[in-house]
Image (cartoon, grey):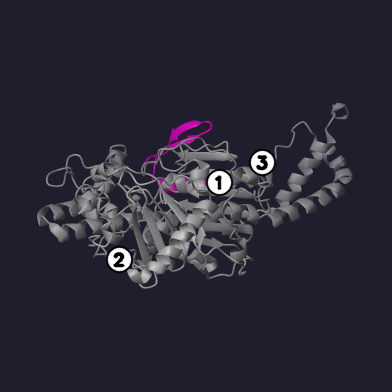
Amino acid sequence: MLVDYKFDSSKLRWYFLKAYLIRSIYPKSTSMSCLPRMNFRRKIAETTFLSVSLVVTLPVLADTSKRSETVKKQPNIVFVFSDDHATHAIGAYNGFLKQVNPTPNIDQLARQGMLFRNSFCTNSICGPSRAVIQTGKHSHINGFMDNGNRFNGDQQTFPKLLQKAGYQTAMIGKWHLGTDPQGYDYWEVLKGQGAYYNPILLSDVGNRIIEGHCTDIVTDLAVEWLQNRDTDKPFMLMCQHKAPHRCWMPAARHLDLYAEGDLPEPDTLFDRYQDNAAVVRAQEMEIDRHMSTVHDLFMEPTEPWMPPKGLPTDRSGTRNLTKMNEQQLAKWHAAFGPRNELLQKAQLKGKDLVRWKYQRYIKNYLRCVRGVDDSVGRLMKYLEQSGLADNTIFIYSSDQGFYLGDHGWFDKRWMYEESLKMPLIVKWPGVTQPASVDTHLVQNLDYAQTFLEMAGASVPPDMQGRSLVPLLKGEKPEWRDSVYYHYYAYPSVHMVAKHNGVRTDRYKLMHFYQFDQWELYDLQTDPDELTNQYANPEYANVVAKMKTRLEDLQSIYGDETVTGEMTQEWQDKHLGNAKN
């Protein structure tokens, strides 16, 4: 009987609060079936519910007002993070590919927010960049120095601190840190690097394969989470894409994009590294010698297109082809079959073949980029339609840059500009001036502190970056005059020597310390970094000052991992003919 039912008035108060909040967001005409579940106790009779309403309404409204103020002060954060997206493959950065309109939605984001023109990574490789963002600490401090490491998730990370500040957090897509994500209320991440088609996704409740294209799947999951999140909390969503990582496999709808005609080439496509340190000539990342026509560019595996024996290559693309369903594979072959036949007939060699390889590579790369751009557009549209846009900070970035034929290369790792630079575009409604451009020297080291200050959370003193919030507000604080870089993975894939270095607004000094080789570039007179000025007497004072600054930064950041020069025998073994 109704009179025998004993209800908990504090819980009933919460139910009223939740109902009030939902009705304050959704119009009265909205069907109750469309609203988030409120989970009212079914045993509470309607008459009882109404009879106590007068008792609880006034205090509930008071609490609601306080809660609304708190939520308003804490903006939502959507962080879209891609893999290997070079700044010169974004129209807003005005690179040599701007004319082909690679990123209409990301360009729109730049018009609505702030574009950081001098945004850099601390270690240009996938996992370490992600670990730096999670911790706000350099690789030598957070323990994740190359992709062979496993991230210690027990350490302090910004999502854990956001949770303590009242945020609901989600990580969806590429994680690539070797251990399960921590600090996230919800996570579903790609296994390892992830596959472009029909990827495996891992979560705390098990693994599953989802059919479709990876970029679309990650976006679908992100939108689904937004639709079903706890609407009583501000949120931080990390939507992280595999694309445009090697081996560049676009979605079916983009297979014919850029099919007609050739795309622009970089001016340094045929760079021969004559003015570089010897270690640079010993790399294995040239489109000419190291990009596989079969595994990277999807030619049929027949002579003369098979890669030379013993050449390291990434076979993930051809492996992924075997896991496509019949419909996906049919569309793939319909697009590339006729194009491959034309190459077979042409029998290209020398520079003509390099140019063909570049065209196949850059078109597939930009097709993958278009999928990421579609994702940005979908998420921005959802935020607008759901009424969340005005209180949501939207951020686009990528773990590092990438070589798009620059210096004849693909991949990243080096401290040269194309891989050192990271895209960073931030839309913060009501705070950041639309269509603004910032030129301060910023790094992924700064992201954790930035997220925390955006959320109104305290920033731990052991984080090593600086919050970008003052810059986003248009302020002109005293700022760093240089950034520090350190790459560790050697000998390893692509054979990029270990090096650390310092970059100022004009100069860049790199030290390949195991070989005791140096490079200095004057970025003002030589933006393509073609002339090594290290041995030029006219730059002797600059070299001395840059070396001092490099030592200072090593000390400031506590980097004691720089080793001395290796033996001559060891150097000769790794340099081979490149030392001549």
Question: Which residue position is annotated with label 2?
Answer: 530
Which residue sits at x=40%, y=56%? 85
Q: Amino acid at mark 3?
A: Arg
Q: Which residues are magenta?
A: 198-225
Question: Which residue position is annotated with label 1?
Answer: 135
Q: Quadrant of the N terminus?
A: top right
Residue 431 is tagged as none
Q: Earlier in the sequence, mark 2 or mark 1?
A: 1
Q: What separation in Å lies between label 3 and label 2 (alpha carbons)?
A: 61 Å
Q: Secondary structure at mark 1?
A: helix
The number of callouts visible is: 3
Residue 37 is tagged as 3
449 over 542 or under it: above or below: above
The front one of 362 and 564 is: 564
Which of discs 3 and 2 lies nearer the camera? The answer is 2
Q: Amino acid at mark 1?
A: Thr
Which residue sits at x=61%, y=61%? 469
Q: What separation in Å lies between label 1 and label 3 (alpha carbons)?
A: 35 Å
